[in-house]
Amino acid sequence: MTRPLSAGMTPAGPVPTLAGFAEIAARYDLILCDVWGVLHDGTNGHRAAGEALIRFRALEGARPRRVVLVSNAPRPWAGVQRILDGFDVPREAYDAILTSGDLTRDLIAERPGARIYHLGPERDAGIFEGLDLELVEEGASDLVVCTGLFDDARETAADYRDSLARLRARAVPMICANPDLVVERDKQLIPCAGLLAAAYAEIGGAVVYAGKPHRPVYEAALAKAAALDGLGAPDPARVLAVGDALRTDIAGANAFGIPCLLVARGIHAEELGVVAEHDRLGDVAEWLSRQDVRPDAVIERLAW
C-alpha cells in the first residue's frame, strides 16, 4: 500500500510545519489520536487539543468525522477515559478508545488458566480483572505480562537484568502491554514497559507486543471506527494518525500505510528545542533528516 502524501510533498521533499490543524483537517474522515503527549502530558491536560478534535468531528462531509483514541496505556479503555476526565478532556472530543490494555486482555483470553507473573506496578492490576488466569510469583509463571517498571521514578531496565535472565532460562513468553520506551511526566522522560520488553528480546526472550507501532492495533482501531456508523472503514488515504513519538506513532502509521502528524511538544520536545512555554518550533528539516521514519507534517501542539 502506498502511503498518501500531504499536498505539496514529495517522498524526498520537506515536511511541512502546520500553524493549526485546520489547514489539513478536511482531508480526513478518521483520526487515530494518541493520548499521552497529545491530549495530556501526565500532569496537565491540553485543552486546545480536545477543542481541535471537537471541531474536527463537527465538520460536514460524505460521512461522519470520527476520532478513535489509540493509547499504549496498559489498562482497559475505561481506565484511560477516567484519566482523561481528570484532565478535563471533553468526551465530545472522541468517539471511542482503544488501548494496549484492551489488546493485552484479548491475548490473555487466548490462554485460559495461564499462570501469570505481573511485571509492573499494582496500579495496572485492573488489566487482569474478570479473566481466567492465576497471578503467581515469577518462578511459578508460564507467562509474564509486563505493564511497566515497579518503580518508574527510580528504576531502570538494568535493575531487571537478573529477573529477565531467570525468565529467559525457563523460556517464559512475555506480553508487553505498553510498547512505549518512555513517556513524558513533569517534563521528565519516564521509562515504560517497552524498555523491559526490548531488554528481554535482546537476550532471546519471546515477546508479543500489544499496541503501536504493531499492525494489529491499527486493524483493531479501524474495525472499531467501522462499527460506529456501519459504513465500513474509511479510505486509508482519509485516515490520519496523530502522535508525539516517532518510534510508535509515526513508525506504526508509516508501516500501516496511513498519513501521520507529529506533535512536537511531546517526548521529542527537548530534541526539537520546545521544552519551555516560550520556546517556538523552528526548522525541523535537519532533525527529521537524521530519523529513520518521517511524518507527513509536524505541528507544535495539536490545536485548531
Image: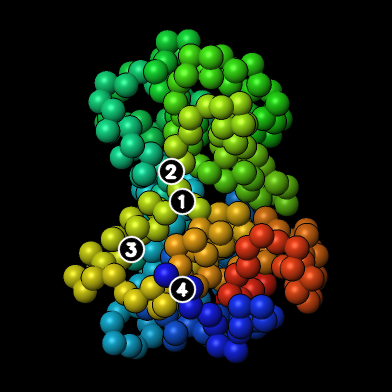
Contact, mark 1 vs mark 2 (Cβ under 8 Å): yes
Residue that badge 1 annotates: 214
Q: Mark 2 or mark 4, which is nearer the start of the sequence? A: 4
Which residue is at a point 73% across and 47% down the rendered structure image? 188
Q: Which quadrant is home to the N terminus?
A: bottom left
Q: Rounded to the nearest whole Å, what is the CA distance between mark 1 and mark 3? A: 14 Å
Measure the C-alpha gap from mark 1 to mark 2: 7 Å
Q: Along the polypeptide, which appears first: circle 3 or circle 2? A: 2
Mark 3 neighbour density, 10 Å: few (under 14) some (14–19) many (20 or more): some
Q: Is residue 285 left or right of residue 102?
A: right
Image coords of residue 241 (percent x, y)? 48, 67
How far is mark 4 from mark 2, CA to CA? 25 Å
Residue 71 vertical position relative to residue 49 in the rendered view, above or below: above
Residue 2, numbered label:
4
Closer to the eye: label 4 or 2? 4
Real-space Cα separation, disc 4 to disc 1, in angstroms: 18 Å
Instruction: Give the residue at x 66% y 78%.
Output: 12
Do tag 3 and tag 2 residues touch (Cβ < 8 Å)? no
Q: Please state if 279 lies on the left or on the right of 268 as rendered.
A: right
Q: Which residue is mark 2?
A: 210
Of the image marks 3 and 4, the number of the one nearer the N terminus: 4
Nearest the eye: 18 or 141: 141
- Viewer-nearest of labels 4 and 1? 4
Badge 1 element: loop
Q: Quadrant of the C terminus?
A: bottom right
Amino acid at dot 2:
Ala
Residue underneath mark 3: 222
Q: Secondary structure at mark 4?
A: loop
Distance from the alpha carbon under mark 3 to that under mark 4: 18 Å
Q: Residues within 10 Å of mark 4 (few under 14, many from 20)?
A: few
User: Badge 2: how crowded within 10 Å, few (<14), some, or many (20+)?
Assistant: many
